[in-house]
Image (cartoon, grey):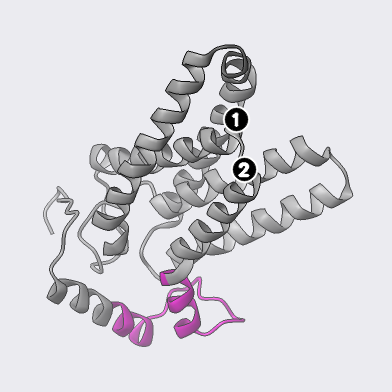
Amino acid sequence: MDGSVRTSAFRDGEGDENIQVFEQEAFIDGPSPLQSKFLSSEVEYKLNRLSKWIVTALFGGFILWRHDAEALWFTSGSILNALLSVLLKRILNQERPSTLKSDPGMPSSHAQSIFFAVFFVILSGVEWLGLNVFTIAISGLVLTFGSFFSYLRVSQQLHTVSQVVVGAVIGSIFSILWYWLWNGFILDAFVSSLWVRIVVVLGSVGLCIGFVLFTIRYWLQDD
């Protein structure tokens, strides 16, 4: 393989089928050293393929449950976070640990998106209910949940440990900064200014529409 890695947002059906076959063969012939002792490789493989949809569904359900301005703000933040991951992959252009995929792997967009959602849920829970035994327990559960799905990217040999760790760190920092930006600056302006409300709402809706198109073109290729 040459020194550069080419990215591709599109793959034909035959390419996708070949990738799945290669993945299955890799798990049978050479499981990762980080393979869980509690779950079979087949279960981890299926969970990994479902992880992005599970996290998206849970995150979306949490957003719909809140259905307020802050939820809308964080929805737009999650989209920008995902786009940032794609941009960083193109810039850093670091190979994945195997030949399963030819696109860059640094940072892991799964880990980055998951940990953005994880810290949004943690920060929102503490904001709503305060810091107590319940919110600490929920925060620990959410963090464990996010860490497990991020770990699957390594156990399935789709990312190195460093690619997953960097993705998780970037997603966490972006989430914290986005949360701070809302509470430190945007919230007061949103409440006091009609124009700010219009910009935030229209901007978020525009990003959501763009993200739907992005999902169809990119996530369905099983990044």
Residue 178 % position (x, y): 54, 29
Instruction: Give the distance between the C-alpha atoms of the residues marked 1 and 2, in whole angstroms.
Output: 9 Å
| Residue count near mark 2 (Cα–Cα under 10 Å), binned few <14, some 14–19, many ≥20 | many
- Residue 27 is a magenta residue: yes
Q: Amino acid at mark 2?
A: Phe
- Residue at 32 percent across and 83 percent down: it is 24
Task: Residue at 55% x, 12% y: name it.
Answer: 193
- Rendered image quadrant of residue 176: top right
**Which of the pair 174/35 is nearer the observer?**
174
Mark 1 in CB contact with mark 2 (< 8 angstroms): yes
Residue corresponding to mark 2: 119
The magenta stretch spans residue 198: no
* 189 vs 83: above or below: above
Up the image or down, 111 lies above or below 204; here it is below
- Residue where numbered disc 1 is placed: 179
The C terminus lies in quadrant:
bottom left
Disc with the residue nearer the chain's start (1 vs 2): 2
